[in-house]
Amino acid sequence: MALGIVGDAVAAVGGLIAGVLNYMTDMFLSAPLKATLNHLEDTELKTLTGEIKTFKAKCLWEKAGAVIMAVRRPG
């Protein structure tokens, strides 16, 4: 019984420390910028399969609509 209480206490303290560290690091992060349509239009895309082709993203929605998901990767 005592071992269970000690385990719960250690888990609670560990969670508290993790929460405080997460809060402190979030204060120093800048807010992400929203992708503008001009930036998305000029993005060069490459095919992943078959013959490798490069084209501008604007080609995706010139004739029909397109759903765009922009993902920012570090580096």
Image (cartoon, helix red, strand yellow):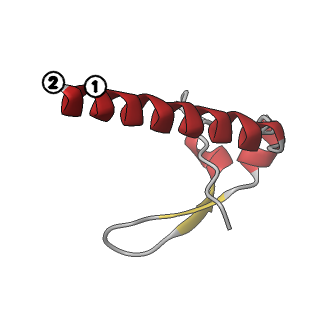
- Residue 56 visible in the snapshot: yes
Residue 5 figure quarter: top left
Label 1: which residue?
5
Q: Residue at x 65, y 61 (%)?
A: 74
Residue situated in front as seen by the camera: 72 or 58: 72
Q: Position of residue 52 (x, y in %)?
A: 44, 75
Q: Position of residue 33 (x, y in %)?
A: 81, 38
Q: Residue at x 73, y 44 (%)?
A: 25
Q: What residue type is labelled 2?
A: Met
Label 2: which residue?
1
Q: Where is residue 6 in the image (x, y as percent from the top left)?
A: 31, 32
Q: Is residue 46 above or below residue 51?
A: above
Which corner quadrant holds the C terminus? bottom right
* Residue 73 badge: none
- Residue 35 visible in the snapshot: no
Q: Where is residue 42 in the image (x, y as percent from the top left)?
A: 76, 54
